């Protein structure tokens, strides 16, 4: 493991080897006939956009998936030339940037298609994908709109529909009734498109959970996201292939002292000691993404043992009770998320304490949390 920079007081160790192994396991699951599009939106779910995108391509992903134009531009600025699919809304005024940087937008309006066509070459039509809303209720065309929209796009020189896709709303739930309903709706759309002679070359539907739960929906490509980071889409879901968590979040002990009974800790004195209590100050807080809801709920690992967070999480610091852990000293490693010794605090457990989901736990890691990347394929300097 790469060591943390000497100046870092909270950092995330990101295991690129684990990430590549997860992607390869998914590739093996879907088989060689199905492409894998690696979802690296939202700073690769907090893990780091550019390093994870590079690792995804090394592991055999055929393209990258982001949500916003800015993410695609960041990848291009890093020298990544692989196809990049934009899932979300792009302003009309940004069509020129999409064309200039060879990004593949999701289109659901003819206004944007025309704006893009104005910057594309009829000799080399710009690829676009179309999202079909089969039951998510967000972005996308409704099923009855798809064939007419495809025909209309086909009349605009300089643009070519490369892909047609949908997104499942409940694939991570044990009850697959609605998942299968959405799949049937999408199949009906594909049948209508095929009958009209308008079928694009790439059809895709599966997120992480559906990739494993609904193999018949693999089509031409799958779009795994959360599972590539070794995390579970929900507590109702377990992967049928081994997946390794990619991220460990750490900090250091900044101070150790024993407080007398009756000592309040943190803003609002939400925790008051009832006995002499040995506490450790840890320089991490909601300014790093360790959310305030973890106050008086969460635990961290110190010397391989669990220590409860006492008092409110502040912007820059937390306090943990280490009374039951002998020998805690200045600059001891503190694990907020991940393994230390025989103990493990997974993202799912932090999510339960914070009343959220594991996606948010990692995505909320802010830029001042230094990322340290492990990569066995490269010498550590």
Image (spheres, rainbow, N blue to C red):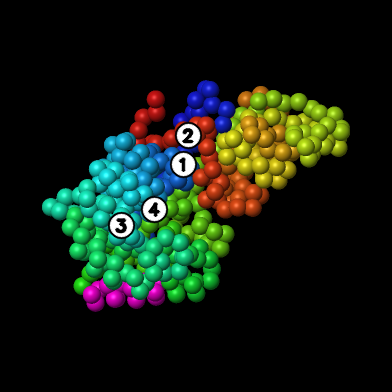
| Mark 2, residue position | 371
What is the crowding at mark 2: few (fewer than 14 residues within 10 Å), some, or many (at least 20)? many
The answer for how far apart the CA atoms under marks 4 and 1 are is: 23 Å
Residue stretch in magenta: 183-196
Q: Position of residue 42 (x, y in %)?
A: 45, 45
Q: Which residue is at the front of the view, 104 or 334?
A: 104
Label 4's element? loop
Give the residue at x 39% y 25%.
Answer: 381
Please report contact status of discs 2 and 3: CB closer than 8 Å, yes or no.
no
Question: Does any portion of residue 110 appear in the rendered image?
Answer: yes
Whether tag 1 and tag 2 are in contact, CB under 8 A, the answer is yes
Q: Look at mark 1 in the image and give the residue it sits on.
A: 47
Whole-percent x, y for residue 178 in the image: 49, 72
- Which residue position holds label 4? 89
Choose between 215 and 163: the one closer to the eye.
163
Nearer the observer, 108 or 334: 108
The residue under the point 38% across, 38% down is: 51
């Amino acid at each position: 493991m790469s060591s943390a920079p000497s100046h870092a007081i909270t950092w995330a160790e990101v295991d690129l080897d684990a990430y590549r192994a997860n992607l390869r396991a998914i590739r093996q699951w879907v088989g060689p006939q199905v492409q894998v599009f690696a979802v690296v939106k939202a700073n690769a779910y907090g893990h780091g956009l550019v390093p994870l995108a590079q690792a995804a391509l090394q592991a055999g992903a055929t393209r990258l998936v982001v949500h916003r134009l800015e993410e695609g531009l960041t990848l291009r600025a890093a020298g990544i030339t692989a196809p990049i699919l934009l899932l979300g809304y792009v302003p009309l005024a940004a069509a020129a940037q999409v064309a200039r940087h060879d990004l593949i937008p999701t289109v659901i309006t003819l206004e944007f298609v025309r704006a893009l066509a104005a910057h594309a070459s009829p000799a080399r039509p710009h690829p676009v994908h179309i999202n079909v809303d089969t039951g998510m209720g967000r972005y996308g065309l409704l099923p009855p709109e798809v064939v007419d929209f495809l025909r209309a796009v086909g009349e605009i020189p300089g643009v070519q529909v490369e892909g047609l896709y949908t997104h499942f709303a409940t694939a991570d739930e044990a009850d697959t009734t609605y998942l299968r309903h959405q799949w049937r709706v999408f199949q009906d759309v594909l049948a209508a498109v095929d009958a009209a002679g308008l079928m694009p070359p790439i059809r895709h539907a599966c997120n992480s959970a559906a990739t494993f739960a609904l193999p018949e929906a693999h089509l031409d490509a799958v779009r795994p996201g959360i599972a590539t980071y070794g995390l579970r889409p929900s507590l109702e879901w377990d992967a049928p292939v081994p997946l390794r968590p990619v991220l460990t979040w750490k900090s250091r002990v900044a101070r150790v002292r024993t407080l007398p009974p009756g000592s309040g800790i943190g803003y609002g004195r939400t925790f008051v000691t009832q006995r002499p209590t040995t506490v450790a100050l840890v320089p991490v807080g909601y300014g790093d993404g360790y959310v305030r809801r973890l106050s008086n709920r969460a635990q961290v690992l110190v010397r391989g043992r669990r220590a409860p967070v006492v008092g409110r999480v502040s912007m820059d610091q937390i306090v943990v009770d280490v009374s039951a852990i002998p020998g805690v000293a200045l600059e001891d490693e503190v694990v907020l998320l991940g393994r230390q010794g025989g103990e493990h605090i997974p993202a799912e457990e932090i999510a339960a304490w914070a009343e959220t989901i594991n996606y948010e736990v990692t995505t909320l890691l802010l830029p001042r949390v230094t990322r340290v990347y492990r990569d066995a394929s490269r010498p550590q300097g």
